[in-house]
Amino acid sequence: MLRTLVPHLLRTAPVRLALTHGPLSSAVVDRFVAGGTEQDAVAAVVRLAGGGLRASVDLLGEGVLGAQDAHGTVEAYLRLLAVADQHGVAAGLDVSVKLSALGQAVPRDGQAVSAANAALIAARAQSLGATITLDMEDHTTTDATLTTLVQLRRDFPTVGAVVQAQLRRTEADCRDLARAGSRVRLCKGAYLEPASLAHQGRRAVSASYARCLGILMAGPGYPMIATHDPELLELTGRLVRHLDRPAASYEYQLLFGVRPAEQRRLAAAGATVRVYLPYGPDCVPYLSRRVVEKPANLLLALHAASDR
Ligand code: FDA
């Protein structure tokens, strides 16, 4: 119910206005979004680096339908990488890209358009020692995104992708992806999916996450554990010890503004921690997913962060 209601609510004119210009804006947006420009994003990357945290920067925006808009997304990512390079933080940086923002849904040749656009970003990233990771959107795009992953990795072998534990197919995808050189970000999944395709309910999704985590951690690839769930973070720690995985062979990933004290705690304990850092003006779809995950986020941000 919340998953359908909140995105509609956040799109209504009064709430949108409050989020972007009103009293909610600095509280909610500032907590979860780095700012509106490439300079804002890179400034946040520099601040995170000062605290021993890495970043994966995401330009907010999705569902682009025109090739011209998709080109604009590419240009923005190239500017971001250039600004990061000017500030000496491009090497080791990751950028997260949504293929839908690169033209995946453009009529007729969207798959080819988005793959070609992603290749432009991957080429620039690779030349600077940065990486790119393909975000995963709803289930209608999973096959297309994994196909693009395979294509991109032929020329840019560090390209990674996200898999969503909520989807029933994901255990099999993890078996397929758990290979030497792979970079796989495991998350629970933020989209409303039908029961025929997706585990329903927190317990079932967490159980699937644990199984997928076991597969990725037992394999020779580079798992990126994207969760804030204390039990799953704890399980990861146990698997690391059991499998004797070196700290450099996996990383934790958490969202900007979510459990920042835990981010610092993991990093202080010697783990690699990467913060998913969104920026850009189009923040409503992203914020609505964060509010669906935790409705208290609206109030929580208003009362300022308790976990800072
Ligand atoms: P869960 O939602 O069960 O939360 C566990 C606990 O973490 C909560 O009890 C609370 O304490 C804390 N918490 C979680 N979310 C919070 C929030 N928003 N605010 C405050 N506290 C919160 N999804 C997707 O479909 N495609 C993708 O490409 C990505 N990419 C991605 C990258 C990274 C780095 C992360 C961390 C997450 C994603 N996601 C994603 C989102 C993911 O699918 C999922 O919706 C969120 O991570 C929330 O799930 P948790 O695993 O944190 O558990």
Image (cartoon, helix red, strand yellow):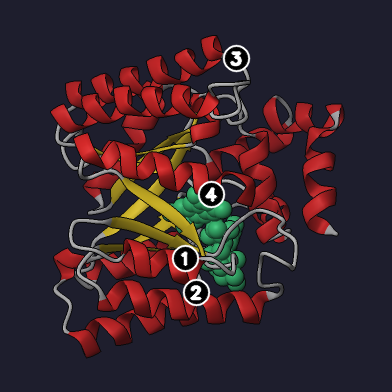
Sequence-first tag of 3 and 4: 3
Between the C-alphas of marks 3 and 2, the distance is 35 Å
Mark 4 belongs to which amino acid?
Answer: Thr
Sequence-first tag of 3 and 2: 3
Tell me if 166 is positioned left or right of 14 in this view.
Answer: left
Between the C-alphas of marks 2 and 1, the distance is 10 Å
Mark 3 belongs to which amino acid?
Answer: Gly
Considering depth in this image, is 114 or 45 the residue closer to the camera? 114
Residue 257 appears in the rendering: no
Extreme residue toward the top, this view = 68
Of badges 2 and 1, nearer the viewer stands 2
Sequence-first tag of 4 and 2: 4
Q: In the rendered view of the protein, which quadrant contains the N terminus?
A: bottom right
Q: Position of residue 198 (x, y in %)?
A: 66, 66
- Residue contact between numbered discs 2 and 1, judged by CB atoms under 8 Å: yes
The residue labelled by disc 1 is: 227
Residue behind label 3 places its C-beta within 8 angstroms of ligand 1: no
Residue behind label 2 places its C-beta within 8 angstroms of ligand 1: yes
Dot 3: element: loop
Mark 2 belongs to which amino acid?
Answer: Tyr
Mark 1 belongs to which amino acid?
Answer: Thr
Dot 4: element: helix
Considering depth in this image, is 23 or 293 the residue closer to the camera? 293
The residue labelled by disc 3 is: 66
- The residue at 37%/23% (across/down) is 116
Between the C-alphas of marks 4 and 2, the distance is 17 Å
Residue behind label 4 places its C-beta within 8 angstroms of ligand 1: no
Dot 2: element: helix
Q: Position of residue 119 (x, y in %)?
A: 31, 27
The residue labelled by disc 2 is: 209
